[in-house]
Image: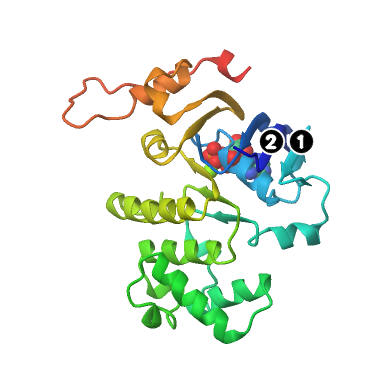
Amino acid sequence: MTTMLTVDNLRVRYPTRTGVIEAVRGVSFTLGRERLGIVGESGSGKSQTGRAIMGLTAGHGIVSADKLDFNGIDLLSISAKERRALRGKRIAMVLQDPKYSLDPVMSIGKQITETLRTHEKIGRGEARDRALAMLEAVQIREPKRVWDLHPHEVSGGMGQRVMIAMMLIAGPELLIADEPTSALDVTVQLDVLKIMDKLVSERGMGLIFVSHDLRLVSSFCDRLLVMYAGKVVEELPASQLNNAQHPYTRGLLNCMPQIGESRHPLPVLDRKPEWAA
Ligand SMILES: Nc1ncnc2c1ncn2[C@@H]1O[C@H](COP(=O)(O)OP(=O)(O)O)[C@@H](O)[C@H]1O
Ligand SMILES: [Mg+2]
């Protein structure tokens, strides 16, 4: 498998008055046309890893790496302009809440066509046709009706599908999905993830799927990175999850409820200082 992304010793630091917060502490992995899951509890550095790849680290954050390469492009040395051109066009990111990613005052159809026309020199008619086709691809049944709606007029699940349509319309090679469905009901979550998974597979894209939900990640990914305190503590094929070695991964597994099981007392996730060392 050809590698599209190489992340070697990625670090993200935030200087504060009381010291430096190390959000990501030497993360390394490679990605081909495959689905990689990044799991770990809240605060383990998953989002900061995704945002650093996307070039969306907050202004005062310091990103460093021995290598951060996307298809031969050194992501650490390109200009802000080159970054913007890459973002959306070749690397896209879906976030948890479409409320923060969709423009509340612009109709859905307009947002999607404008995204497309930012990246490609095409006419309005063609942009409209492609946007309608994309809305159908995310299984929006009446795309012409949804076209004129504003983001607040659609349900959470539909909003997230619109977001996926907008992120995929320019045909990116890599999609970073950061807790893309965590704000949705469980049944809607699975529908949206299945649609995303189908589109990513059909297009032969690479996917980084970030979630705190180990079960969800393992069912949608080929390979898993388990993060703890800004580091990768374990990397394994999703199919090997039950053979996970690291006590933190085993702890996460043990905390996942099984259907039909009654537990007294509920298991508590154990944490050892040496895991963060
Ligand atoms: N803008 C920021 N300034 C300072 N620290 C931050 C900032 N953003 C994130 N962090 C810190 O980085 C760490 C990792 O955060 P994050 O990657 O969002 O975790 P996760 O996505 O795994 O829940 C957290 O300890 C968080 O407090
Ligand atoms: Mg996060």
Q: In the image, is the residue at mark 1 within 8 Å of ligand 1 by its beta carbon? A: no
Classify residue 199 by image quadrant: bottom left
Q: Position of residue 215 (x, y in %)?
A: 36, 35
Picture disc at residue 7: 2
Pick whichever, 180 or 69, lies toward us.
69
Sort mark 2 into few (<14), some (14-19) or many (20+) by Cα contacts within 10 Å: some
Percent x, y for residue 112? 54, 73
Picture quadrant of residue 241: top left
Which quarter of the image is occupied by the N terminus? top right
Q: Earlier in the sequence, mark 1 or mark 2?
A: 2
Task: Residue 86 in the image: state x and y as whole percent.
Answer: 70, 58
**Do callouts 1 and 2 mark residues in contact (Cβ within 8 Å)?**
yes
Say if disc 2 is inside 8 Å of ligand 1.
Answer: no
| Residue at 34% in and 77% down | 142
The structure residue drawn at horizontal position 46% and vertical position 70%, both measured from the top left corner, is 134
Amino acid tagged 2: Val
Disc 1, SS: strand
Q: Which residue is mark 1?
A: 67
The amino acid sitting under disc 1 is: Lys
Q: Residue at x 64, y 76 (%)?
A: 117
SS at circle 2 = strand
- What colouring method underlies this structural image? rainbow
For marks 1 and 2, give the CA distance: 6 Å
Q: Which one is nearer the viewer's eye here, 59 or 231?
A: 231
- Quarter that holds the C terminus: top right
> Where 217 sits versus 178, above or below?
above
How many numbered discs, if any? Answer: 2
Q: Is residue 213 above or below residue 106?
A: above
